[in-house]
Amino acid sequence: MTVLLVPYHLDERLPDSEFPVTADRVVSKELHGETFWSRVAGLYDLVGDAVATAPHPVVVTGDCTVALGVVSGLQRQGIEPSIMWFDAHGDLHTPESSASAYPGGMVLRMLIGDGDPTVAETTGLTPVPPHRITLVDARDLDGPEREYLADSPVSRIPVEAATSTPEGPIYLHLDLDVIDADSLPGLRYPFSPGPSIEQLREAALGVLATGRVAAMTIACTWEPGNECPRYARHLIDELLTAAAESDSRAASSALLRPVPRAASCQGHTAGSGVIGARTAPREVAALALRCRVFRGWACRDRPTRVPRAGIPGPRPTASVRHGPSGSRRRRGRAGAPARGLCWRLRSSHLPPPTRTRFKLIRLRCFCYSILHAW
Ligand SMILES: [Mn+2]
């Protein structure tokens, strides 16, 4: 387990002392930009990098919007999670429906693909299908949010029903304002009545015990400078302990393993790590050589998802240009991953001893794709 602290409420940097955790890493950045979303997009891109490279990430933060970065990080690993979203609020507004224009009230809707596209464009986030989202104990809902929920596949359950978990990998998001405001005085958007700290703890530990939690967020959505960190410390400690314990179960779950023997371009999974936008080409090339072939897709122009090995990925879209991996083989044999070498790499990226080997592999992949195209 890796504890990543993103000490922000929206674009405001908060003191680390507001978060009762010992972080393995603090993710922060100078924020620039005209609009709110352009200011935070770069930060969430860094969060995505951190999540994609950290084993079993737990993100501790001061708002819910950071979830955009967390989900994009999971997607970079080839994980398409179901979302269990514990929150007193729906977070289902659009810029048009929101009376307050509070960005935190729009984030779940943005994960579904609605609203401002800036963060998705920067981080490569792709929409999560609404039927994979479960809203737990959201009770302070506005009219437009109720209307949306009435005919959307997003499910809404009380905290007692959170024992039934969705299939596959889970992203567990805990906005601590889901707790009854009387038990946690000092929240930014308090709502009472609601579940006790104990009830939230039980529900969250139940989800963690499945061993399928790919990432967890703990959103400490309180006003700075009050007693909340002290009240919440024990709960957070227990959640972190449970997350660490569930790691061993998760490690044996094939669903959450990184894509094996993978290498690719910007933002893609490579071996056990992820190549970020700032990774040196030489390093990318070295990884590609070590794997000889990559499983998944290569893309010249922008990050694309690398599907889990052995599981067919999404079909190529016209805007995505692929390397010589020849998708025909994948179509012909269901379940077989595409093979090929990321052709963003050039032999000039390599030191002379490996250059010939690289050229041979590239030639082999090219012949392979020609053979299979015919
Ligand atoms: Mn929230």
Image: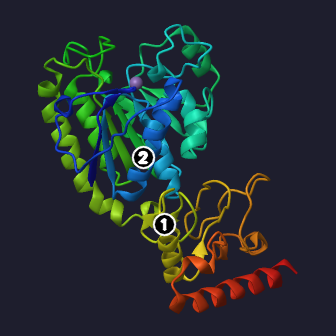
Say which quarter of the image contains residue 63.
top left
Q: Position of residue 343 (x, y in %)?
A: 67, 72
How far apart marks 2 and 1 lie (CA) works out to: 17 Å
At 49% from the left edge and 82% from the top edge, which residue is drawn?
290
Q: Are marks 2 and 1 in contact (CB under 8 Å)?
A: no
Q: Position of residue 55 (x, y in %)?
A: 33, 59
Q: At 65% from the left edge and 60% from the top edge, which residue is drawn?
A: 313
Q: Residue furthest right?
A: 374
Find numbered disc 1 in the image and state the secondary structure of the residue it sits on: loop
Instruction: Name the element at disc 2.
Output: helix
* Residue that numbered label 1 is attached to: 280
Q: Is residue 114 left or right of residue 204?
A: right
Quadrant holding the C terminus: bottom right
Q: Earlier in the sequence, mark 2 or mark 1?
A: 2
What colouring does the structure picture have?
Answer: rainbow
241 in relation to 248, above or below: above
Q: Nearer the viewer, residue 79 or 70?
A: 70
Q: Nearer the viewer, residue 103 or 1?
A: 103
Residue found at x 66% / y 61%: 299
Image quadrant of residue 89?
Answer: top left
Residue type, mark 1 in image: Ala
Amino acid at pointer 2: Leu
